[in-house]
Image: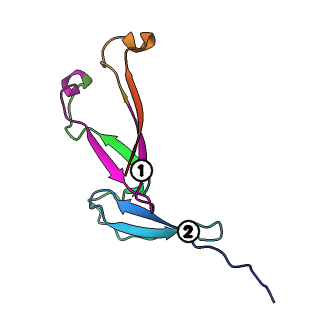
Amino acid sequence: MLSLPSLTCSLQPYYKYFTSDMFLVNQNKFSPRTFTFLAHLDTVPLFQQGGHIVTCQDLVRRAAPLMWKDPITLVVALDKAGQSTGTLYLDDGESFDHERGQFLYKTAPMT
């Protein structure tokens, strides 16, 4: 006979990146780490863990200098407490001024 103590269930949200559909994953140390999802051949199954912010530039360009005026999108995935944190780094993309502190580096929480 085997007896295990009661384990608290730690459900954490994950989001399908392209559809924002949320599903909960049990993240205690005894839970399996393999999941099966249906995916078509023309799509990539990409997921974002709740509590994280991903920074994107959605327009595809041939060269970085063409991107400097393009909008930046923040993809916010909330955790089970309704919070998220992310880091953003920006510089001019051309010079070595970042070596002299000419850049923006911000970590920001969102709720």
Name the residue at 43% across, 9% down: 100
- Classify 86 as above or below 80: above
For the magenta stretch, what is the residue range? 65-88
Q: On the image, numbered disc 2 is attached to which residue?
A: 10
| Numbered badge on residue 75 | none
Q: Quadrant of residue 87?
A: top left
* Dot placed on the residue nearer the N-terminal end, 2 or 1: 2
Amino acid type assigned to the residue bearing label 2 in the image: Ser
Name the residue at 37% across, 19% down: 103
Few, some or many C-alpha atoms within 10 Å of disc 1 (few <14, some 14-19, many ≥20)?
some
Name the residue at 45% across, 71% down: 36
- Secondary structure beneath dot 1 equals strand
**Residue 72: in magenta span:** yes
Q: Nearer the viewer, residue 64 or 80?
A: 80
Left or right of 5 in this view: 60: left
Left or right of 65 in this view: 21: right
> Residue 38: image x %, image y %?
35, 71
> Residue 88: image x %, image y %?
38, 34
Q: On the image, numbered disc 1 is attached to which residue?
A: 84
Q: Nearer the viewer, residue 11 or 35?
A: 11
Amino acid type assigned to the residue bearing label 1 in the image: Ser
**Residue 49: in magenta span:** no
Few, some or many C-alpha atoms within 10 Å of disc 2 (few <14, some 14-19, many ≥20)?
some
Name the residue at 28% across, 59% down: 43
Left or right of 28 in this view: 111: left
Estimate the spatial distance between the alpha carbons at disc 2 and disc 1, rounded to whole Å: 17 Å
> Residue 19: image x %, image y %?
26, 61
Q: Quadrant of residue 96?
A: top left
